[in-house]
Amino acid sequence: MTRYAAIKLAEALAVMLAVSFLVYLVLEANARDVAVKVLGQFSTEPQRDLWLAENGYNQPFIVRYLRWLWNFVRGDWGVSSHYREPVAVMLPPRLLRTGILAGLALLVMVPASFVLGILAGMREGTRTDRAISFASVVTTSVPEFASAVFLSAIFVFWLGWLPGASTTPGFAWEEVVLPVLVLALYATGYLARITRASMAEVMMQPYVRTALMKGASPARIVFRHALRNALVAPITVIMLQIPWLLSGVIVVEVYFAYKGFGTLLYEASLNGDVALIEACAMVSVLVIVVTQLASDVLYTLLNPRISFARRPDGAA
Amino acid sequence: MTLFRALRRPTAAFGAVVVVIWVACALFAGLLAPYDPLISTTALVEPFSRGPDGKLFLLGTDMLGRDILSRLIFGARTVVLWAGLATATAYVVGIVGGLAAGFYRGAVDQILSFAANVILSFPVLVLYILIIVTLGSSGANIVLAVTFASAPAIFRIVRALAIEIREQDFVNAAITQGEGAIRIMLFDILPNATGPLVVDACLRVGYTAITIGILGFLGLGLPPPTPDWGTMVNEGRAMAMVFPYLVIFPCLAISSLMLGLSLLADGLREASREGSRA
Amino acid sequence: MTAIVEITDLHIALPKGADRHWAVEAVSLAVAPAEILCVVGESGSGKSVLASAIMGALPRGLRRASGNIRFKGEEITRLPESRLRAMRGRDVAMIFQEPMASLNPAIRVGRQIEEVFEIHAPAMAGAERTSRALDLMREMRLPEPAAMARRFPHQLSGGQCQRVVIAMALAFTPALLIADEPTTALDVTTQARILDLIRNLRAEHGQGILFVTHDFGVVADIADRVAVMRHGRLVEIGAVEQVLNDPRHDYTRQLLAAVPSLTPRVRADTGAAPALRLEGVSKNFGTVRAVDDVTFEVPRGGTVAIVGESGSGKSTLAKAVIRLLEPSAGRVLVEDADFARLGRGELMRRRRLVQMIFQDPHGSLNPNRTVGDVLTRAGVLGGLAAGGARAQAAELIELVGLEPTALQRRPAAFSGGQRQRIGIARALAMRPAIVVADESVSALDVSVQKQVLELLDRLQSRGGLTMLFITHDLRVAAQIADRIAVMQRGRIVEFGRAVQILLSPEHPYTAELVAAAPGRAWQARRAMASTETL
């Protein structure tokens, strides 16, 4: 297990390293472009030359990259050219707000999709199953910006219950309802489908038949025998959903003008704010790599055939 | 065979009809659209009403006075063309890589899988934003970005299928016959992987359409005045509180296309499952 | 004595669109206390459906159309699900084919046994449940029950898992035990021990046992009475001696004739030069030595069978011989070239010399290519021009006993036995020096198995076919091989002429294998009888 974890960790580090190189390559390979972006369209050539020299851009690319990487690892993420603020100071509050959004979305979608998926997968082909399956196809077919439009049309334009965009500088509950709903709507359908498939597969396993032949009741079969094995896949998938969620977060935050990580990245990209884009990209990749790692570890922990085999008395 | 079996399901048949309608719109946009999508008439005519000149606008006009229905129909052309093209190139790259990695394993597999892991570590949208911001937005760059972002996922699917099929005895038989690697990949492995790949392709065209929509919505899509569903949402968003129809119709368009593709994919998946059982 | 279970005129309908109307049609039979009734049949005979019908748990899509099932005189077909549930595991219990898959992977085996008490005796104290479970495990002769109870199913062997499943089934000493192919997935020596256990339990507790199997050897070893099923219908039922020795029905006779005999066929030793010579072949996976220093030769025109149980390394050896795996050490001499050391190009040119017939008739043919395509391509790769390859394909398809029209069809159109014939034709199309057959008849029903073995025999007597035949079934080896190599844990423990191995084995493991072959005593009597009539 430790060996497995060590290998996974090394892989994750290698991926992060490759990602950092890619990000730097894309954004800063052309030093002159960087100077234009930082100093603005109307800066003069001498100004740019001076800036490049001052900031060490006349060194070879690989040296610049290594220096940037070193600074990044140390926590020096540069200064936003648009906001004139250190990036490392700007990011945490934005991440927190996005974290709240994503956390609430998970809180809604996980229980909902487990219940729906289990109900549907328990007995394949029933009317409940078909209704749930169809509903989840529909919700996963509506992209976030469209469900944001539809839900806003209903709750903001028509019923007038909720605000259509964030306006308060702080945090307000009524402002996160719609963003959370939009995020959860899409992911719930997807996760419910995974849960359903996993549940349906488990229900066809011989050991479920054994339980039936022992005289176990349907409730006992579902809760004692099926659930534990059926949830391994969906729990692993929740982790892998995080990249989707992060993409969705950008759209949803932009739509509802929610001042989180997504809007920050979006605005940074519109402003050509190189340092900010780099930091945002690196942070989002870090989140994904960590969740993938967690997903792998979780899978080994949840799968009895892997996790328990390493016990000393495990020799079969 | 599988397609016919799939279409016997009402949901899949419905999905296929929706997809066919949008493809028809794309192909015959010029014949189907009542007006030129780029020409301005009266701004902000409400749906189902006539402009001052007596022209009927079924879905209304936008703030520049362009007919929304016509823009939706021509928008289908944008989406179907670019989503189709982008998915196709992504598939070519993904299939070639996936076959090679799954058949040869070893170093080839490790290098390709690592590259795929690196790309898949980005949230897709971040990747698109990075590429579009660096290269600028144009149809060709969208194709490039989608290929770059989707090929690794297709690669993984093809690789997994290739590894599975590689274990089958008919592949072993071909190897012991001294059959060449390329022929084994093309004649023994690929044809037996088409089932899941067709299902995935259906969904992926949809995802790509959505991606193009999202890029349009973020203002990173095809440059105006190209009619594009996502861009229409973006443009209408400012006035959505007063004229919600500006954004609702393009959203319905993209959602219905994706729904059609999902239902069709579902039907195909179920049908091929039944086929393998029988 | 009254029957424990009595089935009368049972009809179970298949879903619409199936190839026949009834899964089980007009079946009537009864199981008496302390009786073992074997239900025998080939795949698709409806024997397993019949078994699950008694438990009131038909597979999805199947439906009882008519007929009665009486359990201890009580009609159970119309009982509500709650009553059936109370009976299951207490009055009627069932054990299955895949012992490991029959246990929940996430629950310790001791807990899984205790669960039966939890369900049917909720008032029982936890400590008593535990001690009763341990008692049961002891009775099943599981080693160190206390430690074993804390393990998970994957930490047990297949045989141990089956003992745990039987322990669960016998927790309440049910009046009826239904066993659906309980030993099919096990090795022969394990099978012999489990059959022993079931016999002893019956003697001790006196329950009636309905034992579903496809193997007449197992029937001969365990049954009191036999019911033969075909296409959902009961063909014949009677006492075991009568059915085995004096079958009334043609189909039963056919089936019995198809059962491979342990008596080896005798063929003159040609004394031909070796076509294949293995010298010290080994294959390691990491630190595990799957094949360990194997040396023997196969004479031209002869057949050597490699017999071993699962994990003995026999399939790994086969793969190493044809270079689907790279041997770690040793030489594989084919036409005096070391096949194990050939470079890529040379290997590609010589591949055709060593061909394989695979185990799974469903996986060994590309579903997307017509049979003609497959055979023609094989001929081309074997060095023929396209026209010659086509002509050869037509000859071969006839040679293996299929219609010429088969060439235009795809594998899905053929049965398992027919596909295996196509697989043989494909191997022959390359005009190989030696054919390796890896469990090539194991997935087939006995009657089909017999036909394929006869085909191989016929091809061999035509001359030129040299075969290395891998099998787990000593009986099959007896029918096809001149020489037998017995493999255990990667090593050849005994190698010799088939007659010697089967009649006077020297190595204790060989002796154990021979003794464990199901139906040995019955077959010996049968062989005796047939020599007497001669």
Image: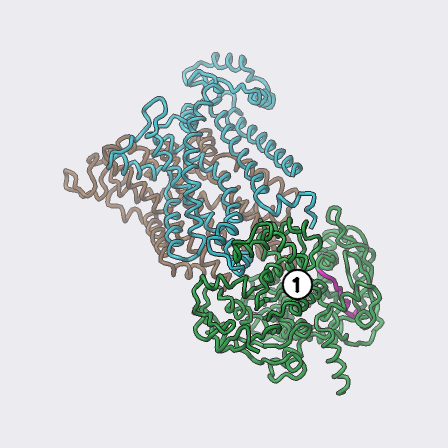
Instruction: State whether residue C175 is above or below residue A315.
Output: below
In the picture, which quadrant includes the C terminus of chain C?
A: bottom right
Hey, which quadrant is residue C99 in on the image? bottom right
Q: Where is residue C182 drawn, in percent x and y? A: 62, 64
Q: Where is residue B142 drawn, in percent x and y? A: 43, 37
Badge 1 density bin: few <14, some 14–19, many ≥20, Cα 10 Å: many
Instruction: State whether residue C486 is above or below residue C146.
Output: below
In the picture, which quadrant includes the N terminus of chain C?
A: bottom right
Report whether residue C350 is seen: no
In the rendered image of the structure, the colour used to display chain C is green
For the residue pair C148 and C332, the one nearer the viewer reads as C148
> In this image, C225 relative to C144: left or right?
left
Q: Which residue is mark 1?
A: C358
Hey, which quadrant is residue A308 in on the image? top right
Instruction: Tell me what residue is drawn at x 16 percent, y 39 percent.
Output: B51
Main secondary-structure element of the magenta-colored stretch: strand
Which range is magenta? Answer: C300-309
**Is residue C302 inside the magenta stretch?**
yes
Q: Where is residue A13 drawn, in percent x and y? A: 60, 31
Report whether residue B94 is seen: yes
Q: Amino acid at mark 1?
A: Phe
**Is residue A137 inside the magenta stretch?**
no
Instruction: Tell me what residue is drawn at x 51 percent, y 75 percent.
Output: C7
Instruction: State whether residue B45 is above or below residue B133.
Output: below
Q: Which chain is cyan?
A: A
